[in-house]
Amino acid sequence: MFGTVTRLKPKQGHIQHLIDMNTEWQEGHGATVEGFVGEYLFESERNPGEYLLVVLFDDRESYRANAADPEQDKWYRQMRQHLTEDPIWEDGEIIHAHSTGMMPPM
């Protein structure tokens, strides 16, 4: 698997906009993106108001294809309007994972 960890700093009061955008993406364009596995959004305990977004894909090729898609770029530009600065992206191969197979409802 391949993915990215992204540090996001939303404008004051804009986190719900970002959550809504991600939900719309998952239910719309994201539902057609080959290789998309899922995502997690964390609020930093150390830096409240700062968020970490983890996005997972089956493989590097699927991730790169999505990143190169003009629809994805359009979505990114809309998302960027809700941030105080450009996100910091850390892409990489997932070399270890463990799950109990159960995710509590949000």
Image (cartoon, rainbow, N blue to C red):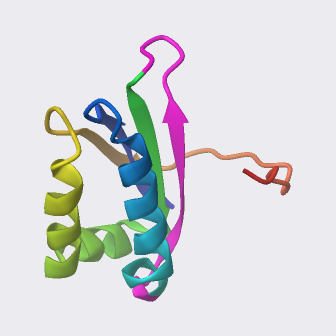
Most extreme residue toward the top, as rendered?
A: 46
Q: In this view of the protein, which residue sits in the foreground, 3 or 82?
A: 82
Return the x and y of residue 99 as percentages of the image width and height.
Answer: 78, 49
Q: Is the residue 105 above or below the residue 21 in the image?
A: above
Using residue 9 as the reference point, say whether residue 38 is left or right of it: right
Using residue 104 as the reference point, say whether residue 24 is left or right of it: left
Most extreme residue toward the front, as rendered?
A: 13
Return the x and y of residue 95 as percentages of the image width and height.
Answer: 54, 46
Q: Dividing the picture into quarters, in which one does residue 37 lie? A: bottom right
**Residue at (50, 79) in percent of width and height:** 27
Over which residues does the magenta segment extend? 32-48
**Residue at (15, 71) in percent of width and height:** 74
**Residue at (31, 36) in percent of width and height:** 8
Q: In this view of the protein, which residue sits in the foreground, 72 or 97?
A: 72
Return the x and y of residue 16 as percentages of the image width and height.
Answer: 44, 47
Return the x and y of residue 11 as percentages of the image width and height.
Answer: 25, 33
Q: Is the residue 98 above or below the residue 38 in the image?
A: above
Q: Is the residue 44 above or below the residue 89 in the image?
A: above
Q: Is residue 4 magenta?
A: no
Q: Is the residue 12 above or below the residue 22 in the image?
A: above
Q: Dividing the picture into quarters, in which one does residue 85 lie? A: top left
Q: In this view of the protein, which residue sits in the foreground, 103 or 91?
A: 103
**Residue at (17, 32) in percent of width and height:** 84
Q: How many marks?
A: 0
